[in-house]
Amino acid sequence: MPSGKCVWPAVICPRFSPESEPEMAQIPALPPAAAALSDVLSNAEGESTAYSVHPPTADRYRMYRYLIIEDDALNARYIAEGLRQQGAHVNVCGDGVQGIAQAVGENWDVIILDRMLPNGFDGLQILQTLRSMGKQTPVLVLSALSATDERVRGLRAGCDDYLTKPFAFSELSARLEALVRRAQIPAPTREMYLADLRVNLISRSAERAGQPLSLQPREFRLLAFLMQHAHQIVTRTMLLESVWDYRFDPQTNVIDVHISRLRAKVDKGFPTPLIHTVRGVGYSLSDHPQDLPEVI
């Protein structure tokens, strides 16, 4: 490859240079199948087209799955080959109809979505369909529509990121990595279980053996904290700081009173007590009290 030149037209990667994109300087020639596909895409007049680019096998790669919905065959090929070199599995769709079918029908780490698709199809229609179906797959809109109003439209339609053309592959790659990382963050815990005790942090409700427990706000906060530290010893200082927001010992029996009330609601009438006092230390919520020292 000539120094500083990209094998595809400059409109696809006008910011490409050995200094700005060293990792892409050795992009290999396209395989025959992909080259043949380029001709098919170029000659097709509104026909539905799609192909897959499979990475070389390597155990060190986590094979991320990307769907590219882009009618510009050369641009799609440029992105697909760059992602392939990073060990990804990439599917490319050249029209909106097949794009929405694959977006809905399979699981993807990120969907790269063009705005202006054949037959007057706006990529935001695909995005809105996905969100209306409850699909939360991260979507990066990649579009030549760079006006602020257009970017705002994309974000309000539900996209997770919006990158305008022309673009540098390194920036696209970094944005995709960020979206993948964000999607891998576990959702906040909504419910906690211990034996037959259930605590819902969203509805701020609790039940034991299917029976609702009527808890005051402070009692619920105390129970939730004990559940978050189930099978552990929770000291009085921990409870004062986390449940009462005290940074000092008020020298009262406020904790003992609330623990007693909570016991009456959580344990009374059930065969297995869950709230235990650990002598001289604090309390514990556990269905295996034999593992705790000096439980009373």
Image (cartoon, helix red, strand yellow):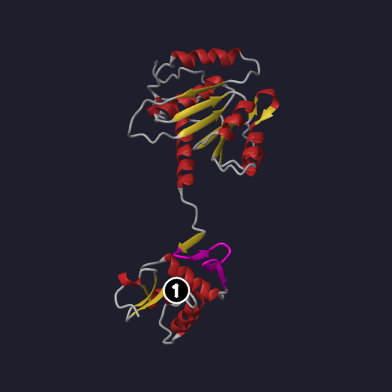
Q: Which image quadrant: the N terminus? A: top left
> Magenta residues: mostly which secondary structure?
strand
Asked whether 256 or 237 is in front, the reply is 256
Give left or right: position of 177 versus 150. left
Give left or right: position of 277 versus 222. left
Return the residue found at the far right: 120
Magenta-colored stretch includes residue 175:
no
Amino acid beneath label 1: Pro
Magenta-colored stretch includes residue 209:
yes
Return the residue found at the far front: 271
Q: Quadrant of residue 29?
A: top left
* Callout 1 secondary element: loop
Answer whether residue 132 is visible to the viewer in this image.
yes
Residue 181 higher or lower than 241, as above or below: above
Residue 257, percent from left and from top: 47, 84
Chain part drawn in magenta: 194-213
Please give the residue where the numbered disc 1 appears in the rendered image.
271
Q: Residue at 51%, 67% (x, y): give it.
A: 209
Residue 132 higher or lower than 214, as above or below: above
